[in-house]
Amino acid sequence: MLNLGFVVRRLLQIIPTFAFILVVTFVIVRLLPGDPLSAMAGDRVTDAQVLQAKAELGLDKPFIVQFIDFTERVATGDLGRSFVVQIPVVNLISQRLPPTLLLTGMATVLAILLAIPLAFISALRRDRAADMAIRGVFQVGLSMPVFYIGLLLLTVFSAQLQWFPVGGYGDNWGDRFYHLFLPALTLAMSLAAVLMRNLRSAIVDVLNAEYVDFARAKGLMPRIILGRHVLRNALISTVALLGPMVGTLLGGAVITESVFAIPGVGRLMIDSIYGRDYPVIQGLTMALAVVVSLIFLATDLLQAALDPRVAK
Amino acid sequence: MNRIAKFAAASALMASISLAALAASLACADAAPRGGTMVYGRYADSLFLDPVLNDANVDIWILSNLYDTLLLPTDDGKGVQPGLATAWATALDGKSVTLSLREGTKFSDGSPIMAEDVKWSLDRARNPKNGIWNFLLASIDSIDIKDPKTVVLNLKQTDPAIIAALSVFNSAIMPQKAFEAQPGATDADKAKTFAEHPIGSGPFMLQSWNHGSEMKLVKNPNYWRQGDDGKPLPYLDGVTFEVIPDDATRILKVQSGELDGSEFIPFSRVEELKADDKLNMELFPSTKIAYGNLNVRPKLKDGTDNPLSNEKVRLALNLAADKDAIIAIVTHGVGTPMSSYMSTATPYHVGQGAQFPVDVDKAKQLMKDAGFEKGFSFSCLVIAGDVDEVGIATALQQMWSQIGVTLTIEQVDNATLTSRYRAGDFSMRLSYWTDDIADPNEITSYFAYSPTIQSQHSGWKSDEADKLFEDSQKELDPKKRAEQYARIQELYKSGPTIPIYESPYPVVLKKSVKGFLQIPLGNNIFSGAYLEK
């Protein structure tokens, strides 16, 4: 079932993606108004000091020279040092990526755990009270801004009931799951809403399909019909959604990371864009491109597992 | 001894023991309890903990916890007190300063602080190639080590601010050998690796730092300063900084008890936190000012005529702006009016009350005299999402419409704003300022002395102000210097800034936190802080 050639082909596709992103990011950051020097020491710097700082950062060299220097270093795995915090970009990313990956992972799991059963109930009880209630709650959740949901959860469950800590990331692995539960739930709501709606309509379609009628006619138990035939086929289109949505979660977690004070890459990306921290923006965009490509690959493999026709 | 004598002796002994016990318990009651780690919430993380090469308040305000200077600022931020130097004396001709170094001081790694470290640190700090703060020590020509406990600074000219400069963060004493042993060809390269494991002589040492998340400081066992109980400071075992950019979350965390305190409380939350009987809502006096910065060149970058180049127009704008109303709306009454371009906490400040009391009729008349009876329009740059700046700009927009001025508010990000500001491509921007030295020379060199940065990139130039500033930089007589600064402030009334308000540092602390201080220059002082049990 697992076509090795398929996997290798997809992995190799990451390389040109990576190269394309490298060039595009390099150009785009330099087109932004202002430069790293603008973001530093706004009021207390003379023109002479700005020129000196520019030279120290290598920003006075022609574009093409900067690009060649940069690609040479990337080829050796050196992503440079952050202009703003002076530590190697690789160290910064390896500190800040795990929290976001863990948060996104937990949010995805929570979203799936919420979406699948609720989609089933909604589909099987279509247009009845349960269906209306489930869709209604998700509608409300989708219309509330993420920071509002987050702050609400923090105020009620952390500050007042003290069931959870007020934001933060925790000190060790067990602690981290505890700290990330509320933010993961906040993120999961919007993903769950989309997954639920999609899965519900896919289930409704499949329930009307001929092969399901045939399975019923054969006398198979409802549990087996739902599990082997309905769910597996309905998931195909929903899994196709999962890839792009999880990719969006990665970057879009910035608001959740700010409200819950999680030191992830969402905040790092925003801060480095504000600070015009070119090495970090470049390094982080490339790292995220690789991560998102791997997520897409994983969802494609999941789809292929559900529908062998995909892998051909 | 007969029985009465024995009895008397015993009573005397009992009495003296009781008195001693009483005295001891009183002393213990006075002495601050030791131990515990204070957890403090910050809105942004530090960036680069090098005293010389940093350029942001997020670094400056906590550097004094890791590094010591020869002289320390006093708690009111206006003077100096002994630090790593116990005595200082300026020569009669004012061209040298002799410093006596404190006995027995050590860096946090246990190595003794030598006169060589002092000379090296000051030479590094005053090197024009290093960072942006070297101007504070620019008057130093050379540094001599007279003996292991005496260092002499030879000055190029008399400098009334050199003593204050020796209490500023960039003159911190660093270990020469440890720094130069770092890998790297340049000072900047060595500074980067040194800053990852800094060695200073301040009350705390850096234990760990997760960038953007948490910084842990622990007490420096070799710190020289003593507490009220005669034992070395700090009272705390450590300080942990947690970075929580969201104001609401940070406050929730203090209210839930997870943080012992937090900085940068929004003005809108001050009243609410004052009413909370578990918390102390402190408003530490500061040198922080909010002001409008105008471009006063005859023509703007795009070649159009600039009405703001007219002094009458600028005065009209100041008179039409009701600063008291802005203070009420934006700072919820926490701010105070400005009577000069510098804060009331800055030495040699003159004036009382609002510098331009609101007078809309006079403003209209001035606009007419200047030939702008029909008004004009211009735009103001503000930092997108900065609640206070947007609030100020919106209030000004309303107020200036009364005199025919249409103000457009352009919200941009910091880097865009700064690059346009430095290029002189703006009509107006809003900004804040805090002093880094207890002397008016820093703010004046940027605001009024045109050679530095064309008076806040405004193009304003007063030959008289320039000359007064240059003279004041050498003037040792405080009375004469006060007169010079009074005149500069008088001239600056037609200057390129619109003084809006001064505001204190809003810090909320648990009631159990004592001894914490943020001085007017911004430094967060944890050396005397303690947690009551």
Image (cartoon, coloured by chain):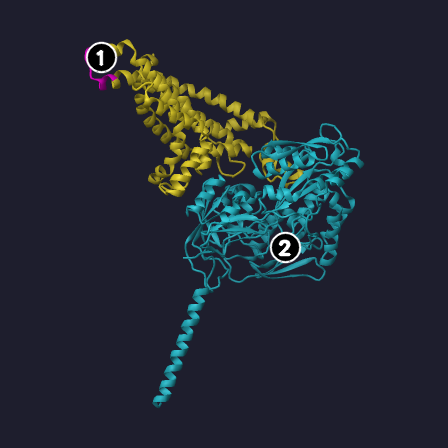
**Residue type beneath disc 2:** Ala
For the magenta stretch, what is the residue range? A217-225
How far across and down, in percent of the image, does residue B110 sit?
Answer: 46, 56
Label 2: which residue?
B164
Q: Residue furthest left?
A: A219
Q: Is residue A223 magenta?
A: yes
**Location of mark 1 (residue):** A216
Q: Which chain is cyan?
A: B
User: Is residue B253 placed above or below B348 in the rendered structure?
Assistant: above
Q: Colour of chain A?
A: yellow
Whether residue A177 is in magenta: the answer is: no
Please tell me whether mark 1 sits on a helix, a strand or a loop.
helix
* Chain identifier of the residue bearing label 2 in the image: B
Task: Chain letter for mark 1, please.
Answer: A
Q: Is residue B111 visible?
A: no
The residue positioned farthest toward the front in the image shown: A129
